[in-house]
Image (cartoon, helix red, strand yellow):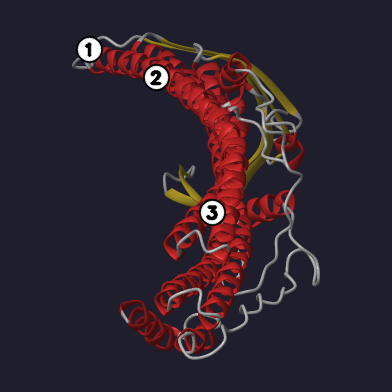
């Protein structure tokens, strides 16, 4: 009676969860009836719902999912705008030594008065109203500014490199998250198929056990134990179906779509069960391609430019340029159509600044050394991350073969236990144990397949390579 009571408890729980879980009430009713009637039919699988990406009635491929995530993610948009701003900064920095042309105008209108003495000796005030003005075109060409503009350009170019690396880092991170979520959906769907097949198997075994009880060759307790197996299999189906919904919601969030919207995914080509790249090639590509290293190198470049600027600011300030001015119109006839040329230069020698210049140079030197150390740390971290990803992929590939062998062996053991039970030389305990072992082995085999594909996606990410179905089909190489 203990197993029958367990079945009723599980049924009550499923009735309570029925509104939240698909098919919950129907499965609960099936469990409650197990001890009194024939086993219920396995719940029908959820009907496939056409996905909204990329078109109604079609399934979303891995490449399409990643492209949509990259197009919709707001952080990528923010990084793209930051890159555009940094690129404009380079243009601004270059203007320090570029020619400029301007138009200048000036005017004056007012009254003046003068006092004159008449021949009779009387002072006479002579007021006058006059206006003056001129328009000039002025051009100038800076020739030298002590290296300040050159350093500012280098700093701006470093800012562009940092922004580009940040954008690439975000894109690669989003791509890996999307690939992981994509394979989680496929894994959940395949696990549901497995759980439904296990439920059907448990129901068939229950029907056989009930027949043997009626024939008088098995005890009623065998039926109760098998009913418990059916109940657990039904719970497993519900959990697997719920995991599909959860996985799809996570994928939709990355795609920038409504999390509750339906979506169907299409499995990519099954990759070979061997990693298609060596560890040395993985490390070499990681050091060449990873945006973390590009970002750290750009930080060093920025610090070097900052040191140059600090040294220029702390030393003598020298500037040299030429300019010209043309006045096409003036109220003064002597200035009309006048042209002027000039060579401009200035020198400034800082005599005392309370140690500010020296401190700024030392600060810039410390920043440069810090960024150089950060670059070395980034290289070590990337090497470790890439090698770990390689080892995980190799292990995941081996797990695919091992779990498949284990699943085959567990299935054979189950068939032997069932045959022994039918022949009357085995016990229901042996059958239920074999059922549990076979179920777990099948679940492990399915999980191993998608863990391997996720490991290959991670391996591509660790090399700084795009995550694409074609690369996965080659075992994690471009």
Q: Position of residue 164 (x, y in %)?
A: 59, 34
Q: Which residue is mark 3?
A: 438
What element does badge 1 sit on? loop
Mark linked to residue 280: none
Q: Which residue is mark 2?
A: 377
The residue depicted at 54 percent of the width and 42 percent of the height is: 173
Residue in the foreground of this view, choosing between 471 and 37: 37
Q: Label 2, label 3: how many angstroms apart (C-alpha)? A: 47 Å
Looking at the rendered image, the quarter that the N terminus falls into is bottom left
Looking at the rendered image, the quarter that the C terminus falls into is top right
- Whether residue 43 sits left or right of residue 348 in the image: it is right
Q: Which residue is mark 1?
A: 352
- Whether residue 251 sits left or right of residue 431 in the image: it is right
- Whether residue 365 sits left or right of residue 61 in the image: it is left
* Nearer-N-terminus badge (1/2): 1
Q: Quadrant of residue 47?
A: bottom right
| Labels 1, 2: front one | 2
* Nearer-N-terminus badge (1/3): 1
Mark 2 Cα shell of 10 Å, populated few (<14), some (14-19), many (≥20): some
């Amino acid at each position: 009676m203990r197993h029958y009571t367990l079945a009723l408890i599980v049924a009550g729980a499923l009735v309570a969860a029925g509104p939240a879980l698909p098919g919950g009430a129907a499965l609960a009713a099936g469990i409650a009836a197990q001890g009194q009637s024939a086993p219920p039919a396995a719940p029908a699988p959820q009907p496939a719902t056409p996905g909204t990406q990329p078109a109604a009635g079609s399934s979303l491929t891995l490449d399409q999912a990643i492209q949509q995530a990259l197009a919709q993610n707001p952080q990528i948009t923010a990084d793209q705008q930051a890159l555009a701003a940094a690129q404009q900064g380079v243009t601004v920095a270059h203007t320090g030594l570029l020619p400029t042309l301007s138009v200048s105008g000036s005017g004056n209108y007012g009254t003046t008065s003068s006092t004159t003495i008449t021949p009779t000796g009387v002072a006479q005030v002579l007021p006058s109203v006059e206006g003056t003005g001129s328009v000039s075109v002025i051009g100038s060409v800076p020739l030298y500014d002590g290296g300040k503009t050159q350093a500012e350009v280098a700093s701006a170019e470093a800012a562009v490199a940092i922004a580009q690396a940040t954008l690439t880092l975000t894109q690669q991170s989003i791509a890996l998250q999307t690939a992981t979520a994509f394979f989680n959906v496929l894994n959940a769907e395949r696990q549901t198929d497995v759980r439904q097949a296990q439920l059907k198997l448990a129901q068939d075994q229950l029907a056989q056990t009930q027949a043997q009880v009626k024939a008088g060759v098995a005890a009623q307790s065998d039926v109760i134990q098998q009913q418990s197996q059916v109940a657990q299999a039904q719970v497993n189906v519900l959990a697997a179906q719920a995991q599909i919904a959860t996985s799809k919601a996570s994928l939709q969030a990355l795609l920038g779509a409504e999390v509750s919207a339906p979506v169907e995914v299409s499995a990519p080509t099954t990759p070979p069960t061997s990693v298609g790249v060596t560890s040395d090639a993985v490390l070499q590509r990681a050091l060449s391609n990873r945006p973390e290293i590009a970002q750290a190198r750009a930080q060093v470049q920025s610090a070097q430019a900052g040191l140059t600027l600090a040294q220029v600011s702390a030393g003598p300030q020298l500037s040299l340029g030429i300019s010209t001015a043309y006045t096409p119109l003036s109220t003064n006839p002597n200035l009309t159509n006048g042209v002027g040329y000039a060579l401009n230069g200035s020198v400034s020698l800082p005599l005392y600044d309370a140690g500010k210049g020296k401190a700024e140079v030392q600060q810039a030197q410390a920043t440069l050394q810090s960024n150089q150390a950060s670059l070395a740390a980034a290289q070590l971290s990337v090497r470790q991350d890439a090698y770990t990803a390689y080892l995980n992929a190799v292990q995941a590939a081996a797990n695919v073969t091992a779990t498949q062998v284990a699943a085959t062996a567990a299935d054979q053991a189950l068939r032997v236990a069932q045959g022994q039970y039918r022949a009357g030389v085995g016990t229901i305990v042996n059958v239920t144990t074999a059922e549990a072992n076979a179920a777990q082995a099948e679940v492990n085999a399915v999980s191993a397949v998608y863990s391997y594909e996720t490991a290959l996606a991670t391996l591509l990410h660790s090399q700084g390579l795009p995550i694409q179905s074609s690369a996965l089909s080659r075992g994690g190489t471009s």
